[in-house]
Each structure stands twice: as C-alpha cells, then as structure tokens.
Amino acid sequence: MNILDAVGKKQSTQKERFEKVRTLVYPDSSDACVTLAAEVAEMVRSRQGEGKNVVLGLATGSTPVPFYRELIRLHKEEGLSLGNVITFNLDEYYGLPRDHPESYFRFMHDQLFDHVDIPAEQINIPDGTIAMDEVYEWCLGYEKQIEEAGGLDLQILGIGRTGHIGFNEPGSSQDSITRMITLDRVTRQDAAADFMGMANVPRSAITMGVGTILNARSIVLMAWGSNKAEIVQEAVEGEMNDRISASFLQDHSNSTFLVDSAASSRLTRFRHPWLVSSVEWGSAMKKRAVVWLSRSLNKPILKLVDEDYNECGAGELLASTSEAAYKVNIDVFNQVQHTISGWPGGKRDADDTNRPERSTPYPKKALILSPEPADAFLGMGGTIERLVEQGHEVVIAYQTSGNLRVADVAAHKFASVVLEMAEEDTEEGWKSQSDYAQEILRLLDDKGEFGIDPERVRSLKGLILRGESRAAADDCGVGYEAQQFLDLPFYEKGRYRRFQRTDEDSDAMRILLEAEQPDIIFATGEAGDPSSIQALSFKAFGEVWESLDQAEWRKNCSVWLYRGRDEAFESHEIDMAVPMSPDQIDGKGEAIRKFMSVNQEELGSPNRNREIAQQYDALGMAEYEAIEAFQRW
C-alpha cells in the first residue's frame, strides 16, 4: 500500500470506520520510514527524468529523524541524488541565532542537509533572527516563495502533545498562514530538556500556518511511541476543531497518518476491536472488554448485567461464550484481582498459581534498569522499597548518566562552593580542587547560556546526578554498593534528538547482564518514542536479552515492564499491581524530590499511582492509597 497515495482511501476496511483520516500502522518507526523514503526517492527520480523539481515541506524534532537517516543512506549507498529537491521547513524558534545547538536551522543541517546534495539555494528555513517589525512581511514572503516554487508536493509533519502541527498551537485557524506564534506551555515543557530548563525555551516561533500546510498536494504525519497515542486518537477519530490543529488533516484529500504500534494503541480498532468487527474472545480480550465496559458505565465489574453488554456493543462476548453476564464478570473480576500483589518478588513458600510472580527462588536478585537516573523512582520507587524490605537483593543500574538534564546553575553552584572552601582553607592540598572549580566556572562562562557543554562540564553534571541518585536510592533502602552507573556511550556522545546507538551500548548491557545474572528484571522504554533515551536504552537491553536465549540463568528470569516517563498502562494492560500505603507513596515522593532536574509533571508521579488505585477501586477491587503497575514482557 503506497503511503503517498491516499486519495479516496481514508478507510480501507470496516475496522477503520471510526477513523476520519487514512492511518497506516507499522510495527516500528524504522519500517515506516524506510517505506516512505523509498516512495519519496521514486518521486525524486521520476521528476529528474522529466527535468522537474520536487518541493518538500520538512519537519524538525525527533519524529522525522529516522526518515532523514534513510534518505541519507539512499543518497550515500544507492546513489540517490536530491539535487532537484527544493525544501521548505515548517518552523523555527524566534530569537535563536542560526548556529544555536537547538535552532531548527542547525538541526536540519546536522540531520539532513550536510549529508546530501540539495543545493544550499534550494533550502528554505524560517528565519528566527529577523527584527520584530519585519516579521509580518517576511512571513508573507515565505508564502510567496512556496507559491513560486510550484507549491508543496509533500509535507512531512510530526504532532505535538497539544495536537499541533508545525507550531500551530490550540486556537490556530484552518486558513492560517505563515506567522509568528506564542508557544503553548506544554510545548515549551516538552522542549525543556533540549534547552536544559524550561526557562531557556523560547516563548515564540515562526511557523507555517495550517492553511499553508493543507495546500500541500500530499501530507504525511508521523507519530511514534505511547505518549502520542492519545493525541493521535483525538486527531484521527475526534471532531475537527482548532483545539487540535492536526485534526484539520481530516479535511485534506491526500493525507496520511503514519504511526507505529505504540502510537496507534488508542485507535478504536486496536483499543476496542469488538466495536468494529468480530474478535476471538480469549482471556485477554475478555478482560479488555469487561474492564472497558465497567469503566465506561462507572459500574463495578460484578454489577454489570446482560443489558449493559448488549447496549454498549459487547453483546457478542456473551453470545460467543453462551454465558450469562455474571459468569463472565466473575471470570474477569478474578483475573483483575489476581494482578494485585504486595509481593513483587514473589511470596516465599506460597501457592503462586494465581500470583503474578513465582515464589521461587527466594530471595531473588532483582535488577532494575533505569534509562535516566530518576526513571526507576518515578515508575517504581515504592516497589523498590518493598523488594528490599522483603529480603531480595536489589541492584539498580542507571543506564545513562542523565547529565543533559542537569542545569548550569547546579554545576555553577558546586564549583562555587568548592572554590569558597578552597579560599577559606589555605593549605596546599586545596590547590587542585581550586583549579578544577575555576576551570568549571570558566567553561560555563565561555559556553554561555545555550552553548554545548564541554566534556568536563558534562562529567561534573553526571557526578551531581550520581549524588542525587544515591540519595534517592537510600530513601528506598538500596545502598551505594548495589548501584551501577553504566554511562552508555550513545548518551555520553550525543544530545537530545541526536542520539545514535552503537555496539558499545550493547556490549555494556551484555557485561551487566552476564555479571549480575538476575532472577527478575524491571525495565522501561519499550513503548517510548524510538529516539527517546528510554526507548534507546530499552532497545540496548532487548537486543542483548534476545541474544542470551541459551543462557541458563536467563531461562528462569522474568522481565517486568514499568512506566516512568512514558504513558501509563491502561487498567486492562496491567499484569501486576503493587499496592502502596500512604507512607510508602510519601516515601516515593521524597525519593523523587532528591532530583533537582525533575519537572512539575514528574513530581506529580505519585498522583498517577493514586489514579491507578482509584481505577481498581472503581472496578470493584479493594481500596488502596496508590498502586504501581507492571506488565509482563
């Protein structure tokens, strides 16, 4: 099925009838981008044969990076020339110089233009450095350039958490054109890590308008990872409105949403497949449907009746099993109830037939993988404490240093304190510390507010985060000797939106797993944006895990997934629910607060655990203060 040929193909099957724009789902972003790049290459070559240009509208951010890398590969390995391509970028932050590491001008050159043969004069990117009183005329000129080039043949898009395309934030009209816009708080918050703090994120940007985008002859919007699932569903299946500018693609005759499995998970055909076609009513599907029905009607599972099933589109479940509602209810109620366990490492000498985790061996060695240092505490801080209390050997492996999240002010504060201590103590032994502190202060001053951290500054920031990690782990009962800092090379050699894994990362994970040989592993990132630290770290683990399939210890090792920064599990997806008392959830909050680099949303992580407990309570389970959720991998 051609990605670029969406004319008249919004829904190809009955299963997609809730979708108001054509949506193609691929197993992962790599497969999708290879296919799209091949079609673009075919278009480019065809136009070359006709002596014509191809006009591409391009997006920035991490989403299109796999697509750009495939274009680069086609150019270098298969001789694809892009000399007849004219490009227009969607947007640019206002006020950033073009050599700023986070400017979209620099991003596009780093990620694409410096590696292919598009002539410089055919590359067009909004200019965020023009004077304020010239912005209006400049934007009109950008529109005219697009028109003079023949209009956009293809517009590539990503989608923000607010549903924006380009920087068309909520409230952008369907006929808007290129203009300056004030950025939404959520958009700035999502960019905070790139800029080492939300305070450093520009408040304005220049963007193509929704109308400009819709004038493209073909549009492809890409979305990867579970964090995009909710907004993709709203844009694809919801009403068209200016609150979600991506929803306007419903009104375009040749537009396609290109998503991976994680980003598609909330579409009706995947989330509630019984509403669009017949399904196989296995145990997992029954659980999914009954939990959905209970939550939709705000009724406990055991109070659902036949009429509820029939009136809400789940009547086929009863018909297929020839059972009354109460029998199905009891079955699913027991399934959900059996996920609840106060023994995440298994209960010694207990019948584990209906328990999530096996009882033997006991105690277990539990390896907790934390992509960034705070992730483990955000996702399972209470469970870590419980594992320790129940006598298991707990090892926390921080896969990356997380130093890019540490603000300059923290490094400046550390160096200043060392310098003051050295000045107060005139003994010769302080000279090296004083020299080090002065060098750090000089390096910070030289790089400025937005410059790239020199290696020595990154190293210091990593050490600061190590101290915070140790303090958080201590709150959960994990000692210094049970913590490992892997500092995976992909992170240390890169920066946000520019990471690339290598064999060195896999080698580090292999050494860890073979040395520890755990009985149980907790990991996160399997459903993250493929360019995120969490997804890259999980990929490094997953590939090594698969390669160790003959190792004796691995055959008896269970793997549990947790969610730290990624979208929380839905109720039906949970295989193990670990309850927490009020004291335990407060303790988790204290551990998280040890990290100065966490934002307000992350500080609210315990509230997510309270919400899961409320969902379980609404299903008819026992009432708990909070629950940490896990899924068997």
Image (cartoon, rainbow, N blue to C red):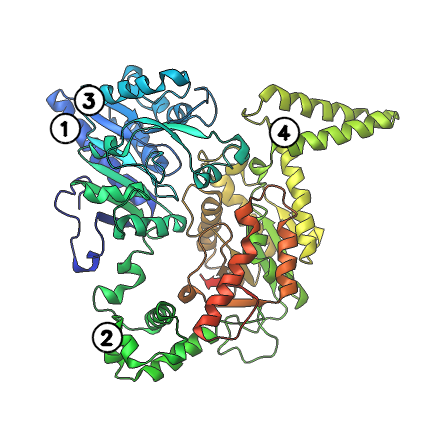
Q: Are marks 2 and 3 in contact (CB under 8 Å)?
A: no
Q: Which residue is mark 1?
A: 46
Disc 2 versus disc 1: distance between alpha carbons? 50 Å
Instruction: Indicate the quadrant where residue 247 lies.
Output: top left
* Amino acid type assigned to the residue bearing label 4 in the image: Val
Q: Left or right? Give the position of 362 relative to 288.
A: right
Look at the numbered discs 2 and 1 and tell me whether their residues touch, using CB distance below 8 Å.
no
Q: Secondary structure at mark 4?
A: helix
User: Nearer the observer, disc 2 or disc 3?
Assistant: 3
Residue receiving disc 3: 147
Q: Nearer the viewer, mark 1 or mark 3?
A: 3
Labelled disc at residue 457: 4
Pointer 3 local density, CA inside 10 Å: few below 14, some 14–19, many at least 20: few
- Pointer 4 or 1: first along the chain: 1
Name the mark on residue 432.
Answer: none
Kindly identify the residue that appears in the image at 43 percent across and 72 percent down: 619
Depth check: 374 or 146 in front?
A: 146
Left or right: 295 with respect to 71? right
Dot label at residue 316: 2
